[in-house]
Amino acid sequence: MNPMSMDRDEPTSLSSVSTNHPLEQFILLAKGAKGSACAELIKQVLEAPGVHVFGELLEMPNIKELETGPYATHFKTLNLFAYGTYKDYLENKSEYLELNPVQCKKLQHLTIATLATQEKCIPYSVLLEELDIKNVRDLEDLIIEAIYADIIHGKLDQECKRVEVDVALGRDARLEDAAAIADVLADWCNACETVLSSVDRHIQRANHHKQRSIRHQQTIEQEIGFIKKTLKAQAENEESASGGGSETHSAPKKNSSRGVPQSVRSCHKGERRSLSRRDDTTVTKSSTA
């Protein structure tokens, strides 16, 4: 079976989900609330749809006052939703408020977001354990709900039994996590510098190959031009030579008798005949003797 993609058209990004939420109204209410009113406010915010970060509310003075006193459990539960996971809740139920189904599902969604920051391909086995879910069908339903709630973006790979996460909602960060976050950012900066150095080397190499190709092309063009000139000169020499020879061979023979009067030519012919007769008589006498 092919992986089942659960990507949605994204009219809003995950970053906007973390900022454009109704938490602001709870912060405004917390400014004037005290004691039991603050405790009730915490219960409401824990199940309020679209509220997935709680750091600002935890920083409110009236909320901090609940850390010690009869409503310490409310404060710890709010702290759990800000930084903890569903497994933390199961391991220490007595320290927190008893969660209703809506609150449990929200904490499970936040747990998926935490796991997604640790690895991009989360096996079903890990999710089943962390979320305390007994069967795969319920797990997939929960993941699909998380995707449609913009907690994560990704797809279900039912063949490999895992969730492939593209991006996940950012949760609140503790102050003690600042050093680890700084280390991650430093590693990211170093990786960026490495990539930039590699890109610069490739650019220099490409420019070197380009210049060498240009020089090679210029050399070839010069050789081609020289060969053309040489061939042209040879053709002109051969053409001039063949033209002079044809004129010599085709020139008509001059008639030596042209321009000589007819009477003179007849006289010459008579002399040649008389000479011819004398020669014949001489040859006859010689043969008789």
Image (tube, rainbow, N blue to C red):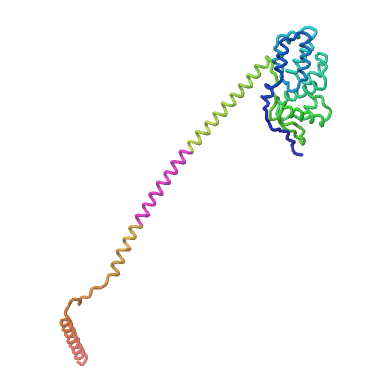
- Taking the magenta stretch, the answer to whether it contains residue 227 is yes
Q: Quadrant of the image for the N terminus?
A: top right
* Residue 94 image position (x, y, % from top left): 83, 14
Residue lying furthest top:
69
* Residue 209 image position (x, y, % from top left): 49, 38
Q: Which residue is drawn at 15% across and 81% down?
A: 264
User: What segment carries the magenta color?
Assistant: 210-234
Q: In this view, does 282 lie above or below 108?
A: below
Residue lying furthest bottom:
288
Left or right, residue 196 beside residue 231: right
- Taking the magenta stretch, the answer to whether it contains residue 168 is no
Q: Quadrant of the image for the C terminus?
A: bottom left
When asked about the image quadrant of residue 249, the answer is bottom left
* Residue 179 image position (x, y, % from top left): 65, 16
When asked about the image quadrant of residue 258, the answer is bottom left
Pick the residue in front: 85 or 284. Answer: 85
* Residue 90 image position (x, y, % from top left): 81, 19
When asked about the image quadrant of residue 71, the answer is top right
The kind of secondary structure the magenta stretch mainly shows is helix
Q: Residue at x 79, y 30 (%)?
A: 141
